[in-house]
Amino acid sequence: MLEKLTETFSGIARRMSGNARITEKNITEAVEEIKTALLEADVNLRVVRRLVNRTIEEATGEAVLKSVNPGQQFVKIVHDKIVALLGDGTAELNLKGPDTVSVIMMAGLQGSGKTTTSAKLAARLKKDGRRVMLAAADLTRPAAADQLSVLANQVGVAIYREDGSKPEKVAKAAFKKAKKEQFDVLIVDTAGRMQVDAELMKEITRVKDAVRPDEILLVADAMTGQNAVEIAKSFDEALDLTGVVLSKFDSDARGGAALSFKSVIGKPVKFVGMGEKIENLEPFHPDRIASRILGMGDVVSLVEKAQETIDIEDAEKLQKKMAKATFTLEDYLEQFARMRKMGSMKSIMDMVPGMAGQIDESKLDESVWKREEAIILSMTLEERRNHRMIGPPRRKRIAQGSGTSVAAVNRLLKNFDKSRNMMKKMAKNKKLQQQLMGGMAGPKL
C-alpha cells in the first residue's frame, strides 16, 4: 500500500529528523523530492503545487529554522499537509437513528468492486449492531443480482431483488419492505457501465430520486489514480456524492487517488478496501495514513487489529506461559492463525514505526510460515505440547508427513527453543519492555 510514496517520504523524514540544523537550501531540496514523488504517484498537479508552496512557506519560517528540533518540526509540517490533503478527520457515515431506515446508495463504474463493497459495508454495519438489507438495483450487468444474493447470504443479511423490473422501482420497493420489517439500513447497489455515459447518469439519478439516500458513496478503483478522480467529478455533478470508497487500496502502490479526492472534488474518502475478504473494509483515517507514508507506522490500527483477533484472557495466559517458558508448539500454531487474521506479514510490518517502506517484500517469504505450520500439524498433540520428546525417528516421520525434510524439522525445533528463551527474558524484563514500547513511539511531532 502506497509503497513508492512511503519509500521516498520515510527517507526524507529520517534525514530531516536527524539534522540538528536545517537550512532553506536543504528544505528546498527535500520539498523538490516530495514534489517529484507526488507527481510520480499520479497526484493531481494542482494539488501538488498547493502542498509544495504551503510546505515551503511554513518550513522556511523562523519558527522552524531556529527551533530546537528543526528537522522534526519540518516532518510535522509535511505530516500536517498530507493529512489536510487526505481530509481532516475520519469521515463518518451520516446515518439516522436505529428506529428509522437510513439509505446508502452505492455508485460506480463496472469493475470498480461496487457489488462486493456493498456486501462488505453491510457486514461492517451488521457488526456494529445494525439491521441491514441489501437491494439489488443493478439490472444491467448479467448475474449482478445473483452475485449480491450470494454475498448477502455469506454476510447473513437480508436482500431484496425483483428481476425484470426497473432499478428505481426495485429501490423504492426495497425501501418500503425495509421500513415495514424494521430494518435500519438499506444499501442500494446500482448499475455501472464500462465508462461514464448519459444513460447511466439518468438511471442512477432516478434511483436517487426514488429513495432520497442519506449517503451516496462512489466506489472507485484506487489503482486507476487520476482516472478515478475524473470519474468521481462526473458522478458528483450528477448525484452530489457524500463520500468515496476506494477499492483495492491495499494494492495501490502510488496513492494518487487517495491524495487527490478531497482537494479536487471536496468529498472525503470514507472507507478503503484492504483485501478480498468480506471483513476487509476499513474506515479511512487521514492521520494514520499520513503517518504510514512518512514511515512512522500506524500503531493505533495495529492495536485495533490485535484487539479484534486476540482475547484479553488468552493474552494474559500467553504472557504467563512466556514468563515460565511453558509456551508450546501448540501455542505457536495458534499464533499462526491469529497473525493470518490480522493480514499479511507485509501489511503488519508496515504499521510498525520505522518499518514502513523498509521491508524488502521478497524477503518476507510467508511460505516459511506455511512450511512450519505444516510441520507442526504433522505432529501428535503430545509432541506439540512437549517438543523435547521428538527424537530422530519422530523427526523423520514428521518430515514425511509434512512433505518437508528432517533438516527443516530440526531447524524449526532449534528456532522454537531460541524464541522461547527470548520470550521468557522479555516477559520478565520490565525495563526491556519499556524500552521496546518507547522505541515504538516513533518520531515525536
Image (cartoon, rainbow, N blue to C red):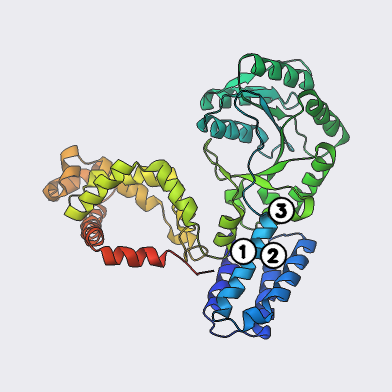
**Circle 2: is it few (<14), some (14-19), or many (20+) Cα within 10 Å?**
many
Coordinates of residue 141 in the picture (x, y in percent)? 73, 27
Instruction: Inspect this view and state whether residue 374 appears.
Output: no
Q: Mark 2 points at which residue?
A: 38
Dot label at residue 225 = 3
What amino acid is found at the position of numbered circle 3 in the picture? Gly
What amino acid is found at the position of numbered circle 1 in the picture? Leu
What amino acid is found at the position of numbered circle 2 in the picture? Leu
State if disc 1 and disc 2 touch (CB < 8 Å). Answer: yes
Front residue (pair 1, 281)? 281
Q: Earlier in the sequence, mark 1 or mark 3?
A: 1
Determine the image quadrant of residue 123: top right
Element under disc 2: helix
* Quarter containing the C terminus: bottom right
Determine the image quadrant of residue 38: bottom right
Residue at image point 77% right, 16% down: 165
Q: Is residue 298 left or right of residue 217?
A: left
**Circle 3: is it few (<14), some (14-19), or many (20+) Cα within 10 Å?**
many
Q: Mark 1 points at which residue?
A: 5
Query: How many marks do you count on the picture?
Result: 3
Residue at image point 60% right, 22% down: 149
Instruction: Inspect this view and state whether residue 154 appears.
Output: yes
Q: In this view, does 362 lie to the left or right of 194?
A: left
Q: Compared with residue 71, is residue 135 higher up or lower down, i.e. above or below?
A: above
